[in-house]
Amino acid sequence: MGSIIFCGACGTVTGSAYFLETGGKRILIDCGLYQEKDYEKINSNFLFDPKKIDYVILTHAHLDHSGRLLELVRDGFKGEILTTEPTVDLLEIVLADRLHLEPKLGPKSLVKKVLKLCWAFEYDQIFDIPGGIHFRLKDAGHILGAANVEIWCEGKKFVFSGDIGRPGTPIIRDPSPIKEADYIIMESTYGGRKHPPFSLAKKQLKAIIEKAREEHARIFIPSFAIGRTQELIYFLNDLVESGEIKPLPVIVDSPMALKVTKIYAKYTNLYDEEALARLAKGDQIFSFPLLFAAASVEASCRIEQIKPPYLIIAGSGMVTGGRIIEHLKRHLSSRRSYVVFVGYQAKGTPGREILLRKPRVFLDHMPVENRAKIFRIEAFSAHADHQELLSWLKNFEKEPKRVFLTHGEPGARSVLLKDIRQNLGFTVEAPRLGRKVTF
């Protein structure tokens, strides 16, 4: 008999971690960081002994799925980390950035210790783990290298969705369908929500830029370094090179995003047909006139010398850290500042408070008046919306024994749960943190 314990992302959209014990092996699927406010205590404590974990299977490199690998290895994990090759490359950047921001976690060599435990696997091939366990990684269509995880053990099949991408996501391929499972552990980030089409994202971005040009305004886009920044550059490339907008200074003020973009450029074999067609025509999809990189702190500070209008892309995506903080500390109080949100803003984050137009927001413990013009482009989301989540589930040709919804705030989870139960007839639940299920 085996079991699974839900060790994270239960009622939140961060902190993904699931502990599967089967075949005499202890397997952790994801080891994510909580990024919501007041979760420091949860981040510092595991619901299991890291020394006793044999394997980690990592769905992708986003911090909320991979960030606590630093603590896991620091606290004694010596097993193997199984994931895709792009995820290993991205993981080095993500973990080094976190350790730079939180040096108390351990020495710089801690990142190398994590990477030495990583083994890369390709999509769509079945691999064996001792104990009669098999696993396969399927393209999740979320970010470069992201995977859904299939695990066969004790005559049963588990599917861990990780983050489910959207059909039509720029640059990368659409999610690969999975057709059977006994148990499904599935994200619910956008339960109850419908995303506009990606084509609308480009139109909205164009309209915001044109309005900012008229008002000589500064545009600030808090953006995740992995996936979202590359999509933004991709769309801006299209707008500029097609002549739909006149070039204006666009500054990527994120050393991490610049490194990630180089990784994206490395794995063209994972691009979708549209991106490959552009490359075949000679288009440099991550470059266009007046695109600048601010790699150093000095270069970031020199941005202030540029006369608006201009556009800055900087992390972090939820305004919880990074260089976007300094820009908004200086300019959030100006009515000639535009803040454009292109990703999910978790409850309790500064990004959420700015988006909700709170009159005063604390940035790096400093109160800042929020007088900027606030925009939200929901079409950029790399997470499947409500109907896309249901469509992903409908690929399963046989009814699963149970579906467990995680990685979603309570309202989103409950709406999706109700729809799955009523319209698909599946047995579905929203597990609490620490819930143990035997099989």
Image: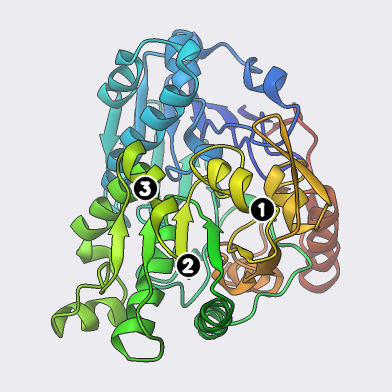
- Using residue 144 as the reference point, say whether residue 163 is left or right of it: right
The answer to whether residue 14 is above or below residue 303 is: above
The answer to whether residue 359 is above or below residue 396 is: above
Camera-side mark, 1 or 3: 3
* Classed neighbour count for the residue bearing mark 1: other residues with Cα under 10 Å, few (<14), some (14–19), many (≥20): many
- Using residue 246 as the reference point, say whether residue 103 is left or right of it: right
Residue identifier under label 1: 332
Query: In the rendered structure, which disc, 1 or 3, sits on the residue that comes first in sequence?
Result: 3
Give percent across and percent down for residue 24. 48, 19
- At x 70% / y 67%, what residue is drawn? 373
Q: Amino acid at mark 3?
A: Arg
Query: Secondary structure beneath disc 2?
Result: loop
Query: In the rendered structure, which disc, 2 or 3, sits on the residue that comes first in sequence?
Result: 3
Q: Quadrant of the C terminus?
A: top right
Give percent across and percent down for residue 121. 27, 44
- Using residue 276 as the reference point, say whether residue 99 is left or right of it: right
Query: Secondary structure beneath disc 1?
Result: loop
Q: Amino acid at mark 2?
A: Pro
Real-space CA distance between mark 1 and mark 2, rounded to the nearest whole angstrom = 15 Å
Give percent across and percent down for residue 172. 36, 67
Residue identifier under label 3: 302
Real-space CA distance between mark 1 and mark 3, rounded to the nearest whole angstrom = 18 Å
For residue 308, the mark is 2
Q: Amino acid at mark 1?
A: Leu
> Which of these two is toward me, 228 or 336?
336
- At x 46% / y 28%, what residue is drawn? 98
